Image: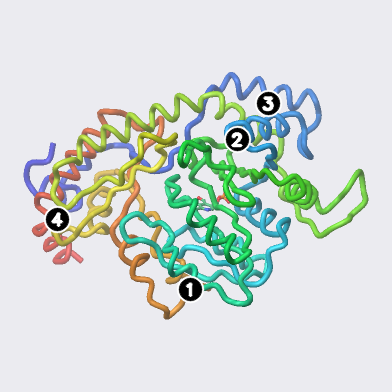
Amino acid sequence: MKRALADLAALGGAPAFDTPVVFGRPNIGSRKALYDRLDEVLDSRWLSNGGTMCEEFERRVAQEAGTPYCVATCNATSALQLALRARGVTGEVIMPAFTFAATAHALSWIGLTPVLCDVHPEDGSLLLSEAESLIGPATTAILGVHVWGRPSRLDDLSALARRHSLSLIFDAAHAFGCSWNGRPIGGFGDAEVFSFHATKFINSFEGGALVTSDAELAHRARRMRNFGISGHDTVVSLGTNAKLHEASAAMGLTSLDDMDHFVRRNRDNYLRYRDEISGTPGLRLLEVDEQEANNYQYVVLDVDVAATGLGRDDLIAVLEAENVIARRYFYPGCHRMEPYRTLRPLPGTDSISARVMALPTGECVTADQIATVGALIRFAVKRGHEITRRLQQAA
Ligand SMILES: Cc1ncc(COP(=O)(O)O)c(C=O)c1O
């Protein structure tokens, strides 16, 4: 327990943790189940190209998403590109600036132009009025993002896309296992894309999936995933190599076996952080709507420097010195990164990306650790002005 400023590791004290408590440490699931599946894969001598593990993974992801079709891929970035190509998207695509670079990269990498739209400073959701004003003659699609697995105003966004005859695709990298108005994420728009990267609560080491209710889109995406090949060797369209191999699918299935457990652990962690933080002036945990299905994989802390005297970046630095690795997520917004830098002001994105941070959670993070992290945060914020001054002097 830190009692004096000098106890803080950032100011010369000993770190609160010997080993780091890290944001994004993977959930592993049952090793036995994974090894059994890997044995099955090796015995079958079918390592990739839509083997039985991949097919079962697709069935289970589709079931969870409530969609008839799922095309599993080597990562979500590729799945986004397949969705866009399979849907025939061209020209300009409107997307939020407040997202991971992959959303914009997925577009640019296949020759589409991302048009960056601002977001609500409170929750990072797309500003629909601005999105509408950005629609021009070259716009063919909107790429929405369910930031932190928190879908927002999907009915209004769908109506906007319909009004302007635009395709609507969702980067649902964060939103597997979430719902909106009681409907699972996966069935909205023309297609949605999940990430099963190692840092996601369900992981296949690396992996992703496109889900859709559009049979033709799914068929095209499946073909494009495998070089545009139809049958054994007839290339009938442009394609790429975006296949999910069998070892990854085996890990994905093993992860899915434990999905309820991971969600429970994430929810417990979220509630513990909420108890630790509640009542501390200038701090707010982004709320989860408990009426909806949630994966709780991001515990997002919003820091109001005007009230705390300690900015988000300094709080991250204080925690990092204690061996607590929290992340700016997302920072700084795509409009301030190359090659998307724009002079157009995006004040909502600037505001939220300067305030929020994601705290360590997942099955590796214990109740005791959260209690210590909570105490550290409260202490740092209580002495916010002095800590800021001392950090500035030390710099
Ligand atoms: C919002 C968002 N979109 C896309 C991606 C890319 O996912 P992947 O690493 O599976 O390609 C990520 C990765 O974390 C993400 O956060």
Name which quarter of the figure residue 98 lies in.
bottom left
The numbered dot on residue 66 is 2
**Amino acid type of the residue tagged 1 in the rendering:** Ser
Task: Reply above or below: 54 against 323.
Answer: above
Q: Where does residue 123 sit, x and y in percent of width and height?
A: 35, 54
The numbered dot on residue 133 is 1
- Left or right: where 102 falls relative to 317: right
Task: Reply above or below: 13 against 389.
Answer: above
Foreground of the two, 70 or 241:
70
| Dot 1 or dot 4, earlier in sequence | 1
The numbered dot on residue 38 is 3
| Dot 2 or dot 3, earlier in sequence | 3
- Tell me if the residue at label 3 has its CB under 8 Å from ligand 1: no
Local SS, label 4: helix
**Amino acid type of the residue tagged 2 in the rendering:** Gly
Q: CA distance from mark 4 to mark 3?
A: 51 Å
Q: Where does residue 199 sit, x and y in percent of width and height?
A: 48, 42
Circles 1 and 3: CB atoms closer than 8 Å:
no
**Amino acid type of the residue tagged 4 in the rendering:** Thr
Foreground of the two, 250 or 79:
79
| Dot 4 or dot 3, earlier in sequence | 3
Measuring 33% from the left and 37% from the top, which residue is drawn there?
A: 19
- Left or right: where 106 falls relative to 273: right
Circles 2 and 3: CB atoms closer than 8 Å:
no
Q: Nearer the viewer, mark 2 or mark 3?
A: 2
The numbered dot on residue 308 is 4
Local SS, label 1: helix
- Left or right: where 204 falls relative to 120: right
**Amino acid type of the residue tagged 3 in the rendering:** Leu
